[in-house]
Image (cartoon, grey):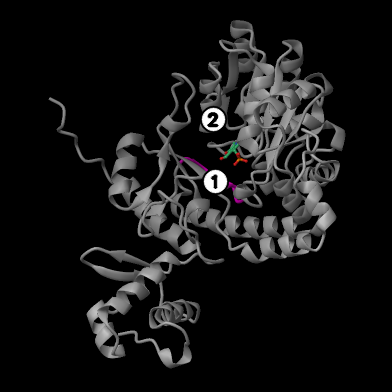
Amino acid sequence: MWIPKLEHYSGPRYMAIADAIADAIKQGDLNHGDRLPTHRALADTLKVTVGTITRAYAEAERRSLVNARVGRGTFIATQHAQGHRFKITGESEPDSVDLRLNLPIAKDRAKELSQTMAQLATEPEQMNRLLGYQPDVGMLSHREAAVEWLKLTGLNTSADNLIITGGGQNAIMLSLLALTRPGDSILSEAITYPGFMAVTHQLNLRAQPVAMDEEGVIPEAFEDACKQFAPRVLYCTPSLQNPTNAIMSNSRREALVDVARRYHVWIIEDSVNSNLLTNAPAPLAEIAPDQVIYINSASKTLAAGLRVGWIVAPDEVRTQISNALRASNWMTSPLLAEICSRWITSGLAKRLLEEQKQELSHRNQLIEQYLGHYKSRINPHSLHAWLELPVQWRSSEFIQQADKQGVKVIGEDSFVVAQYRAPQAIRLSSSSAWSANHLERGLKILAELLQQEPEPSLSVF
Ligand SMILES: Cc1ncc(COP(=O)(O)O)c(C=O)c1O
């Protein structure tokens, strides 16, 4: 039985016990899944009341160090390899492996943030500037920092072309607000990011699927859809497409732009994942800056909570987009954009990105090891993998069975536009597992399940 040595700790006893649990985890004396002594046993050993232990375990749970399970006891929670994962409301229990969300790898960045804020605290003039109204498109220094950052994705632009937004999702909304009217048909990859569909729904747009292959949108299908629907806009993700991981070759990009020019269709290029790629092909916005509205954000590489994103748009539509921004939000918070800019200019952003890439490459190797022999799209740099299920499985059944065994994934249904017929498939976001070990636990379960037959359903007769 683990017994804390409280003589090393000052302050109230319940706090001392919680501190001792934290230290024991750090030192490896307590590990994920270890069961803590019962309240009664520890109270007797430490000669404190049961109430003190109850408060201590509650404090440890508040710090995400342990999980209490009714009737079973208190267990050490899964710790993230690079720091504690922070509890978010609605998050599934740590015991289950939740691979449903495309998140940046959870990482303790509190120190970085506090250093940035401490530095800012020594600059009263700048603080006052950040607390005031600023140009709707964002402060020049913030736009200049973004221009530097986006060079990593192969985009060369100037601060005049750039608008700071409240993240990638906001950037999609602003672009569509500016470019479309209710009732318009809008094209996208047939299997696409659900956040895009949420916007089309809100704006009463008619999303039309364009057929894809392993490189994403097929130019001939795009052309056919242009003839059929006379759309104003195509939305697509040419690099590390969500969910299929498709990456368009240079020639595919040229072909797509050619169709867009001939049919006068704006392309919204969602590039939020492209920073993760090394040597990504040139963005569409680099090939055709006059035809493409380019979107990127800090969410997948630095921190989603910063809520900073960027739009690079041609002259012809930039004013419409900044009008939409002003009408909806006046401007993106300069304070958040300042933090993001400081991270970029100090080199911290690059370091965070490199760390993210390294961890992702390790996690994607694990996916390759366990599931690589299935029809899958695994990329060492991606936040997610895409797996077409073997013939015996429908995705709805597979998801249900995996969930019963403690692994949560999502199926093609969540990504399909209109009634496009997609293969039965699942997306696994390795980035949303709490650690590489946690991911591996989930992968073993999935690999085993994939070899089995679904249970026959007798619920319909
Ligand atoms: C393809 C794609 N675009 C945009 C977004 C939204 O990004 P943000 O968090 O910056 O709003 C996401 C988030 O999952 C995404 O996967």
Residue designated by label 2? 192
Relative to 367, is 59 on the left or the right? left
Q: Residue furthest bottom?
A: 7
| Residue 400 part of the magenta-drawn span | no
Badge 2 residue CB within 8 Å of ligand 1: yes
- Residue type, numbered disc 2: Thr
Q: Position of residue 357 (x, y in %)?
A: 64, 55
Q: Please tell me whether residue 95 is drawn above or below residue 219 in the rendered image.
A: below
Q: Position of residue 331 (x, y in %)?
A: 72, 35
- Label 2 neighbour load within 10 Å: few <14, some 14-19, many 20+: many
Q: Which mark is residue 347?
A: none
| Residue 377 part of the magenta-drawn span | yes
Q: Please tell me whether residue 148 is drawn above or below residue 283 in the rendered image.
A: below
Q: Position of residue 235 (x, y in %)?
A: 63, 25
Relative to 29, is 337 on the left or the right? right
Q: Secondary structure at mark 2?
A: loop
